[in-house]
Amino acid sequence: MPSQFKHSSQSQVTISELMLPSHSNFGGKIHGGYILSLMDQIAFACASKHSENYCVTASVGSVDFLNPIEIGELVTLKASINYTGRTSMVVGIRVDSENIQTGEQKHCNSSYFTMVAKDRQAQSTVEVPGLVLRTPTDVRRFLECIRRKQQKENVHHNLREKNFEMDTEYLEELKGHNMQVQLNTNA
């Protein structure tokens, strides 16, 4: 049985990988999909280490590619548990790259992966250890996860189909965006 509570330092994971031409896209930069794959791998490792169980990706927060990664750069991904629910964890991931010849470093992106712990047969969810918050940074990260979760729930709740009426309030909000409204009033 896993420990009842753990500090994020007990499950932090760091990986570094040299970016090869085979990782590049048609523009000569490292393919974003390849970086996302590495992010998913490190999220899995971090969540599995914390929960002491097999884990699956439930959702991925926004991923903003801040700086391109060049062939030949060393990419370092750092992951830690920022939040724990009953069966889920939010893994914060930071991606940096380094030109190994000049030493120049860039922050390339950060994201949050929600991972769910599963039993040995990967059928049922299992409870995960809680998180010990020791520093103001630990508290801030945990609270940020709570707020992101609440914002996501509020957006989904406010725009659910059953609550959504096509009135002028929503149509006004659409003005100025690159779209056309062609409602089928017979539906």
Image (cartoon, rainbow, N blue to C red):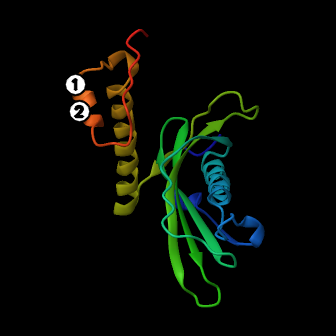
Q: Residue furthest bottom?
A: 102
Q: Which mark is residue 168?
A: 1
Quadrant of the rendered structure where residue 175 is? top left
Q: Secondary structure at mark 1?
A: helix
Q: Which mark is residue 172?
A: 2
In the image, 120 versus 151, the foreground residue is: 151
Quadrant the N terminus occupies: top right
How many numbered marks have been drawn onto this rendered protein structure? 2
Whether label 1 touches label 2, CB < 8 Å: yes
| Rendering coords of residue 121 (x, y %) | 76, 31
Q: CA distance from mark 1 to mark 2?
A: 6 Å
Compared to residue 65, the image places residue 174 above or below, namely: above
| Rendering coords of residue 116 (x, y %) | 59, 38
At 66% from the left and 62% from the top, the residue drawn is: 31
Amino acid beneath label 2: Glu
In the image, 56 versus 87, the foreground residue is: 56
At 73% from the left and 65% from the top, the residue drawn is: 23
**Is residue 64 among what the camera can see?**
yes
**Is residue 5 among what the camera can see?**
no
Q: Which mark is residue 152?
A: none
Q: Residue furthest top?
A: 186
Q: Secondary structure at mark 2?
A: helix
Amino acid beneath label 1: Thr
